[in-house]
Image (cartoon, coloured by chain):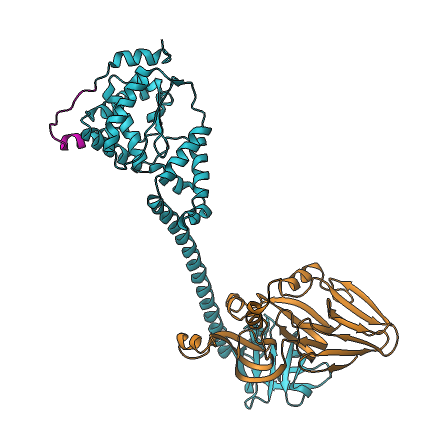
Chain colours: A cyan, B orange
């Protein structure tokens, strides 16, 4: 039998100038035969072959004689199988061991690379969330002047959806509620300026830093002043708990988050003003809503106003919402009304039997004037 | 083609003498001076076809140029002087088949029987060898000229040999290397200033350079006056 195919490879031998040359390798019956371009021939009988694997690619097979004076090497993928066959199985075992060791090595490499990639990915994700969480915590350390700036900027560029009501009876009644609650706010020094806007939407919101907007549609739905006091208390609680800044910190990109952490508030103010101008001002998280309810109950109780008004208002809206959800803006984005009503009632029970002073407001008149567009007669 | 390497090792240039019809392929920008009897052809291919755009793009990844300059002598006894960009050495490596793996930017010129391609050496080596992600792979027969930063010294490895990262110029593909620690402990390796090293094993020729460009840049950069 003559040799099978030939393979490109090389040979190391002291018989060659420089000790190395490229060669054409043939697997003959007698052994591994190498022929250099100069015409020199080398033969390594299979029985004398010692095999090694290596080279830059890691899969080059080296056939050496006992004293390593002759080495024939080849990198072709099919060489190992051909060598195993040509040697009549003589080299199969040692080839098998070499290839298995190489596979183990390469698997190990893949494992290391995969764990490295996973580690880097985990670090990136952790870093990303870490910065976001830290930014969220950092906003609480910032001065409230920042909230005021954002609220003021947002209010200026906002479309309130209707004309502002200037009727002193309507505005005065609501401002009186604000003034009773303000001394009990968790953060002092904030100016809660109330605006009434004539529009048939059941809504009220507060902007960071204190501006509060109540719509005549909401006044119309409230059966008594305590119910609106509940809503105002809830909105003031969002302001004092700085939920607006938290929401901004949650929504900013990673760059602004890093800016917040290094104390640069320019991006925060610009982004915050835009967020509150464009996005729904009532998109607080469930946790923030529940916290604002709780804080509202505390403030109302401290101010001597019956906090049950808030729960009652929820119940009214919950019934209305069943018929036409989108009409009631104030509650449509507020999740889990029943749970919130239950929470408020629970807090009330814990407060015992306090004596509350009813608000000295002619509510029927306020509602009538508000329904008429609140124009001063 | 005959060659002579001038003013070794600090500011080497190679003087190549070609007979009519002989060609040599050089790195773009390597030519310093030449006789009048040369035609210069710039392509992304190997002289006489082969390769093409893909190989050219791979060469870019390896730190070489998309284009290759082919100098062909049109008259007898024409001389071409070529040199590297940085101060350093040039070495001639005669290739008789087989493959030499060259650190990106160390390939200077080669005979037309040598194919220039790029090769990926694995993620570990890409990140930690102090070299580029891709290496230049020269295979075939003919004259190969490599350049270095500082002087080049050849080592005929038989067994094992350790080189600091960033000091490899080229090695024959019969050699394998992996990245390892300089001393037994990782802390010791870094405190000793050696950090990671390239551990070669097998049989074949290895070319090392006495200096490495990134370290030189780090040393010199801060001392330069801002313009």
What kind of secondary structure does the magenta stretch mostly adopt? loop
Residue found farthest to the left: A353
Residue in the picture at 43% in, 32% down? A154
Magenta stretch holds residue A34: no
From this viewpoint, is residue B24 visible?
Answer: no
Q: Position of residue A211 (x, y in %)?
A: 36, 29
Residue B226 placement (x, y as % from top left): 60, 63
Residue at the extreme right of the image, as rendered: B75
Left or right of A188? Residue A348 is left
Q: Where is the N terminus of chain A found, in terms of image quarters? A: bottom right
In the rendered view of the protein, which quadrant contains the C terminus of chain A?
Answer: top left
Between B211 and A182, which is closer to the camera in this rendering?
A182
Out of B212 and A261, give the one closest to the viewer.
A261
* Start-end of magenta stretch: A347-359
Which residue shows up at 40% across the image and 36% down it? A149
In the rendered image of this protein, does residue B137 appear above or below residue B54? below
- Looking at the rendering, which quadrant does residue A60 occupy? bottom right
């Amino acid at each position: 039998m003559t040799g099978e195919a030939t393979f490109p490879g090389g040979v190391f031998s002291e018989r060659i100038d420089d000790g190395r040359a490229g060669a054409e390798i043939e697997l003959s019956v007698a052994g591994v035969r190498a022929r250099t371009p100069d015409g020199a021939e080398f033969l390594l009988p299979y029985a004398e072959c010692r095999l090694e694997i290596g080279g830059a690619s890691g899969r080059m097979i080296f056939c050496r004689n006992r004293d390593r004076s002759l080495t024939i090497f080849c990198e072709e993928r099919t060489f190992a199988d051909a060598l195993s066959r040509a040697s009549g199985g003589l080299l199969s075992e040692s080839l098998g061991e070499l290839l298995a060791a190489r596979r183990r090595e390469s698997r190990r490499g893949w494992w290391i690379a995969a764990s490295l990639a996973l580690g880097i990915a985990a670090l990136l994700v952790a870093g990303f969330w870490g910065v976001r969480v830290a930014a969220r915590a950092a906003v609480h350390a910032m001065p409230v002047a920042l909230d005021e700036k954002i609220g003021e900027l947002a209010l200026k560029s906002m479309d309130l959806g209707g004309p502002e009501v200037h009727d002193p009876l309507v505005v005065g009644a609501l401002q009186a509620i604000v003034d009773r609650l303000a001394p009990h706010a968790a953060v002092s020094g904030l100016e809660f300026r109330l605006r009434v806007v004539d529009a048939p939407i059941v809504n009220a919101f507060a902007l960071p830093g204190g501006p509060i907007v109540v719509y005549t549609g909401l006044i119309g739905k409230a059966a008594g002043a305590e119910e609106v006091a509940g809503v105002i208390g809830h909105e003031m609680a969002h302001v004092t708990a700085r939920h607006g800044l938290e929401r901004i910190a949650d929504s900013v990109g990673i760059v602004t988050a890093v800016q917040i952490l290094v104390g640069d508030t320019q991006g925060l103010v610009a982004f915050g003003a835009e967020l509150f101008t464009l996005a729904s001002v009532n998109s607080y998280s469930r946790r923030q809503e529940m916290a604002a309810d709780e804080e509202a109950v505390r403030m109302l109780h401290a101010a001597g106003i019956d906090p049950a008004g808030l729960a009652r208002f929820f119940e009214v809206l919950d019934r209305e919402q069943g018929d036409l959800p989108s009409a009631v803006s104030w509650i449509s984005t507020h999740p889990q009304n029943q749970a919130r009503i239950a929470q408020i009632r629970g807090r009330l029970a814990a407060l015992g039997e306090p004596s509350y002073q009813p608000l000295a407001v002619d509510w029927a008149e306020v509602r009538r004037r508000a329904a008429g567009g609140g124009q001063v007669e | 083609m005959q060659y002579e390497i001038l003013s070794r090792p600090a500011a080497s240039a190679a003087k190549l003498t070609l007979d009519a019809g002989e060609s040599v392929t050089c790195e773009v920008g390597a030519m310093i001076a030449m006789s009048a009897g040369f035609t210069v052809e710039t392509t992304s291919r190997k002289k006489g076809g082969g390769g093409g755009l893909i190989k050219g793009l791979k060469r870019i990844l390896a730190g070489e140029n998309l284009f290759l300059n082919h100098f062909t002598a049109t008259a007898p006894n024409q001389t071409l002087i070529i040199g590297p960009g940085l101060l350093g050495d040039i070495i001639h490596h005669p290739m008789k088949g087989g493959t030499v793996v060259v650190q990106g930017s160390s390939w200077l010129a080669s005979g037309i029987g040598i194919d220039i391609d790029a090769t990926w050496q694995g993620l570990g080596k890409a990140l930690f060898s102090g070299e580029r992600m891709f290496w230049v792979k020269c295979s075939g027969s003919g004259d190969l000229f490599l350049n270095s930063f500082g002087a080049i010294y050849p080592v005929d490895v038989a067994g094992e040999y350790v080189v600091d990262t960033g000091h490899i110029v080229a090695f024959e593909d019969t050699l394998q290397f992996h990245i390892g620690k300089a001393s037994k402990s990782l802390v010791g390796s870094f405190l000793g200033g050696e950090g990671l090293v390239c551990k070669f094993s097998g049989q074949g020729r290895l070319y090392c350079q006495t200096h490495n460009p990134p370290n030189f840049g780090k040393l010199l950069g801060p001392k330069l006056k801002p313009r």
